[in-house]
Amino acid sequence: MQKTSEAAPVDFEPTLDFALEQDKQDPLRLFRNRFYFPKVQEKEAIYFCGNSLGLQPKSVEEALLRELEQWRMHGVEGHFEGEMPWMHYHKFLLPQTAQVVGAKEEEVVVMNTLTTNLHLMMVSFYRPAPGRFKIIMEAGAFPSDQYAIESQVRWHGFTPEEAIVEVAPRPGEMLLRQEDIEAIIGQHGRQTALVLFGGVNYFTGQFFDLKAIAEAAHRAGAYVGFDLAHAAGNMLLKLHDWQVDFAVWCSYKYLNSGPGGPGGVFVHEQHGKNPALPRFGGWWGHDENERFQMRKGFKPMPGAAGWQLSNAQVLACAAHKASLDIFAEATMQALRGKSERLTGFLAYLIERSAKEFTILTPEDKDQRGCQLSIYVSSDGKGLFDYLHRNNVICDWREDNLSATGGGVIRVAPVPLYNTFAEVWQFAQLLEAYSG
Ligand SMILES: *Cc1c(COP(=O)(O)O)cnc(C)c1O
């Protein structure tokens, strides 16, 4: 299919001893102790849902209390007092954020939430002209992205039918083929204003070749943007080097910032340097040296900072920062290295199973992250409920087209806090299930 499929070297063994030995040798094993684990029926859960809401780092409480104290002690003067004055709070998150997505510090900013940021980016990067008005996207994108794109297209006076081109899997297939993505970009090239893709598809877990998509979009003369909700903190990203025009993500999935945590934005430096690029303005995006002069005439900050509207959501950012500190310590390289093996081990155990489970997610480790989407052809909800009774927290999506209650169970072992032993236990449960 896409790149030559490098199946993981199978040096795995299907035993608990093997799993325990892997955990013992895992250089990241102690990070698990920095998180709280929810309980199901009084017993610590096997939490495979970090793709939906990451676990709470124990350090978050202290980080929040610190800001509450600032507020209690200083009131408005907290904007200037202490180690991390609120006035500059957004800046304290940038170095680590830049590392997570492979960007320069000036290219990222933390603000708002994902869908809001997607709209703000489309204000700048979807500016359709009469001959060039199409958006190319993946079929089956996350609903919020579909609604955002559809409403943007209508806002500019087009119908979704004429302006949105979806790349779909071939009949009988579930995954997108890279060659199809590039062919469709080529085919609609001159009419295309924007190519907008997810990084990792939320449903299938497929990771797209973002560099190749960016190149194809640019060959067509279009902008390219990515929704990295399921990729940030999961995949190794190089947004700057890949020449991505913009990207957005949320921080409450793999990045563990807590429910409704702040979103992230990447704007490539070539655009960040261009104050003439149209955008929606607000005082926090205005030149900070003049911000408090309260004068007319919007003068954007250089870089992604020039897209900020409001002052930082300090409490939400404090929780996010506590988690980013952990990522900086663990490093994305090490996390990704463990993730490939952890998810590889899960795939290995499921494939050996006598049961008929189909993994939708690509087999090639370069085309997937933590998540495996397991298709269950009948009574998937029954299996999901059984897993929950046995302390597994994962996720269930019904297949609306299935007459037999089929659907997908999504499981995401996360390298920061999950173990090989948990993966083994999960596979045992699958094996023991008898409908
Ligand atoms: C989780 C997710 C969202 C959520 O959007 P919010 O604006 O943060 O509520 C959007 N898009 C994708 C692809 C997601 O996975």
Image: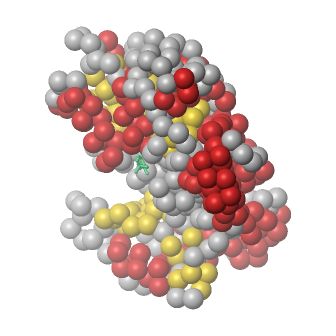
Q: Quarter of the image holding residue 416?
A: bottom right
Query: Residue 404's x, y, as percent?
Result: 24, 71
The residue closer to the viewer here, 108 or 52, is: 108
Q: What is the count of numbered marks?
A: 0
Q: Quarter of the image holding residue 168?
A: top left
Q: Say whether residue 328 is left or right of residue 190.
A: right
The residue closer to the viewer here, 374 or 269, is: 269
Q: How has the structure been colored for display?
A: secondary structure
Q: Say whether residue 415 is left or right of residue 387.
A: right
Looking at the image, is 306 positioned above or below residue 168? above
Query: Residue 254's x, y, as percent?
Result: 57, 54
- The residue at the point 83 percent across, 63 percent down is 25
Query: Residue 302's x, y, as percent?
Result: 58, 19
Query: Residue 218's x, y, as percent?
Result: 46, 16
Residue situated furthest bottom in the rendering: 42
- The residue at the point 31 percent across, 48 percent down is 143
- The residue at the point 39 percent across, 67 percent down is 396
Q: Say whether residue 126 is left or right of residue 161.
A: right
Whether residue 259 can be seen here: yes
The residue closer to the viewer here, 432 or 196, is: 196
From the image, which quarter does the C terminus lie in? bottom left
Whether residue 255 can be seen here: no
